[in-house]
Amino acid sequence: MPAAAARVVLVTGVSRFLGARVANTLQADPGIERVIGVDTVPPETSLGRTEFVRVDIRTPDIAKIIASARVDTVVHLNLVTSASTSRAKAKELNVIGTMQLLAACQRSPDTRKLVVRSSAAVYGSSPRDPALFTERDEPVEAPASGYAKDAVEVEGYVRGLQRRRSDLKVSVLRFANFLGPGVDSRFTRYVRMPVVPTVLGFDPRLQFLHEDDGVEVLRRMVVEDHPGCFNVAGDGVLLLSQALRRAGRPFIPVPSQSIAVFADMGRRFAGMSGFSPELLRWLTYGRVIDTSALVHELAWRPKYGSETAFADFVAAQGLGHGLGHDIGRGVLDRLGAVLGRGGT
């Protein structure tokens, strides 16, 4: 569609990898006069001409910034999925923060476009899932916890704003799991475990999105008008076993009720905070989304498929040198002994 005049753009979550990359990409567009990045902590990398404002979007201060800067486009990337953030704080940032931000957008006469980062996790993961989820499909088993449930609530509040401000152009993007050199996520930490537990009897189909393609989709949503809800993922799928072999990771199938035994090892060696229910269900049943609506809308396909996105992640992490394999149940006793001695 023809370019839309986005002149003053506000990006939330600018201190995280996706927000920083999107802000840096948008500031390079000569048609955009100002890019304002907001977060609760300063970014670790330079944002160039992006103006950083330290603000908590859970407070009314965000409305003052939007009003005083006459922001016409809001890019909401502040969906917290990190395992390093406490669940209570993540819930507040995701849900309460979004409510405050949307209220500010509703009151601002200058704001005319909203781009929202959501997640394919809104579809849940279930043994009764369809082969492909389209944007019109409802989850077979709705997410009951974690950031997936937050994303469902966020989308509900966005629909409420659309009813109140029908003049707003709103784009909601349901992203598959991000991968790439700059991505630190529950899944990337899971893959870096010294021995990776998988759920016995299951080999889920997984989809990934390279961070470069995610940034490009967000850029297009800002500088062009593409209202609607869109699934976003790289082409193709990988089985979990294929991914672990390509990463050269030893893995061991264990019963789902026993996988929590590995949580301590994940904390010690990979910085994980255990296996959340949504992560465990995804590693059991997987999830695949249909991206044909996005491809048709943008007349564009992601540069990286799921396989090549995973390969780029593996290369950036220095993985893949060994041959990943199922090490069998015989190793459990040795792992238990290691954990019992504090990993020495």
Image (tube, rainbow, N blue to C red):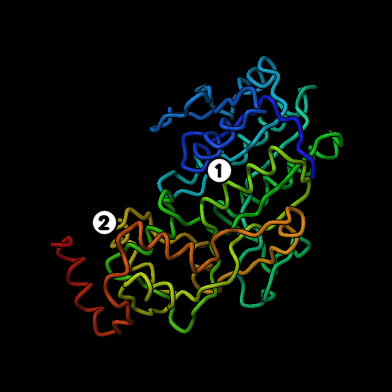
Figure label count: 2
Q: Nearer the viewer, mark 2 or mark 1?
A: 2
Name the residue type under label 2: Arg
Return the residue found at the far front: 30
Q: Which is more toward the observer, 95 or 135?
A: 135
Query: Residue at the location (47% across, 34% down)?
Result: 15
When the figure is inspected, residue 35 is found, relative to residue 239, above or below; the finding is: above
Q: Quadrant of the C terminus?
A: bottom left
How crowded pointer 1 is (Cα within 10 Å; few <14, some 14-19, many 20+) is rated as many
Q: Position of residue 23 (x, y in %)?
A: 55, 34
Q: Quadrant of the N terminus?
A: top right
Q: Position of residue 58 (x, y in %)?
A: 59, 29
> Gap in Å between the C-alphas at discs 2 and 1?
25 Å
Q: Which mark is residue 178?
A: none
Q: Is residue 9 left or right of residue 159?
A: left
How crowded pointer 2 is (Cα within 10 Å; few <14, some 14-19, many 20+) is rated as some
Query: Residue at the location (69% across, 75% down)?
Result: 130
Secondary structure under badge 1?
helix
Q: Which is more toward the observer, 313 or 205?
A: 313
The residue that mark 1 highlights is 91
Q: Is residue 84 left or right of residue 334?
A: right
Secondary structure under badge 2?
helix
Q: Which is more toward the observer, 144 or 56?
A: 56
Q: Which is more toward the observer, 145 or 173?
A: 173
Q: Is residue 200 left or right of residue 219?
A: left
N-terminal-most mark, 2 or 1: 1
Q: Which mark is residue 268?
A: 2
Name the residue type under label 1: Lys
Q: Quadrant of residue 168?
A: top right
Q: Quadrant of residue 180?
A: bottom left
When the figure is inspected, residue 90 is found, relative to residue 129, above or below; the finding is: above
When the figure is inspected, residue 109 is found, relative to residue 135, above or below; the finding is: above
